[in-house]
Image (tube, rainbow, N blue to C red):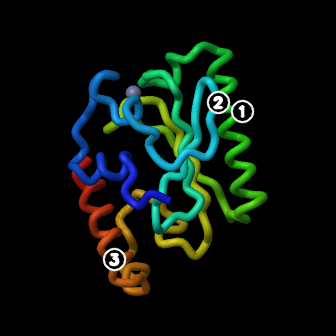
Amino acid sequence: MNSENSFSQLLKSGGHIQSNASDCALCATPGGELVYQHTKFRVVWADEPLYPGFLRLIWQSHVPEFSQLSHEDRSLCMDAVVVLEQFALTHLKADKVNLATLGNVVPHLHWHVIPRFKGDAHFPAPVWAALPVQSATALTHQQQVIVQENNRLWACW
Ligand SMILES: [Zn+2]
């Protein structure tokens, strides 16, 4: 797995907001390790060290909002998200799956499919929440650095 995918690099850069396809990281790069390619979307491993199995479904064309898809494409997209959720539950044995689409920094339609486990760093809080102090003390130094960077970036939003 690529340890520095373009999505992570973008977040670490401070979140330069992209306004169109010409400067869009998800138009220019796969956005992670490609695991499935459809003509209208792709699925990539998000490479989030604290969250194994974190997937992103990225729409192929530069569309900022889910509502901008046709009815048919919205159905296709949601059916694919459901398949990924079921994969996380069945094969990864996730305790819960979190689904999210934000696009505040990268306004190119993508869905986060996040397998959650009762022992993960943030459970039951969202993965983007500040890390609880008691969880932070149980992490390795490298994980603590990642968490601190994650908390710093999300605090800026
Ligand atoms: Zn784009």
Residue designated by label 1: 79
Q: CA distance from mark 1 to mark 3?
A: 36 Å
Q: Amino acid at mark 2?
A: His
Residue drawn at 56 percent across, 39 percent down: 57
Question: Where residue 22 sits in the image (x, y, percent)?
Answer: 29, 22
Ligand 1 quadrant in view = top left
In-image side of 51 versus 97 (left or right):
left
Instruction: Give the residue furthest to the top.
Output: 70
Report if the beta carbon of the residue with label 3 is closer than 8 angstroms to ligand 1: no
Q: CA distance from mark 1 to mark 2?
A: 13 Å
Residue drawn at 33 percent across, 83 percent down: 141
SS assignment at label 3: helix
Report if the beta carbon of the residue with label 1 is closer than 8 angstroms to ligand 1: no
Q: Which comes before the other along the chain, label 1 or label 2?
A: 2
Residue designated by label 2: 38
- Snapshot quadrant of residue 147: bottom left
Q: Is residue 128 above or below residue 157?
A: below
Q: Are marks 1 and 2 in contact (CB under 8 Å)?
A: no
Question: Where residue 42 sits in the image (x, y, percent)?
Answer: 58, 35
Q: Which comes before the other along the chain, label 2 or label 3?
A: 2
Q: Residues within 10 Å of mark 1 (few under 14, many from 20)?
A: few
Q: Residues within 10 Å of mark 2 (few under 14, many from 20)?
A: few
Q: Are marks 2 and 3 in contact (CB under 8 Å)?
A: no
Residue drawn at 38 percent across, 70 percent down: 131
Q: Amino acid at mark 3?
A: Gln
Q: Amino acid at mark 1?
A: Asp
Nearer to me, 111 or 124: 111
Task: Tell me the tag on residue 52.
Answer: none
SS assignment at label 1: helix
Question: Where residue 59 sits in the image (x, y, percent)?
Answer: 53, 29
Residue designated by label 3: 144
Residue drawn at 49 percent across, 36 percent down: 110
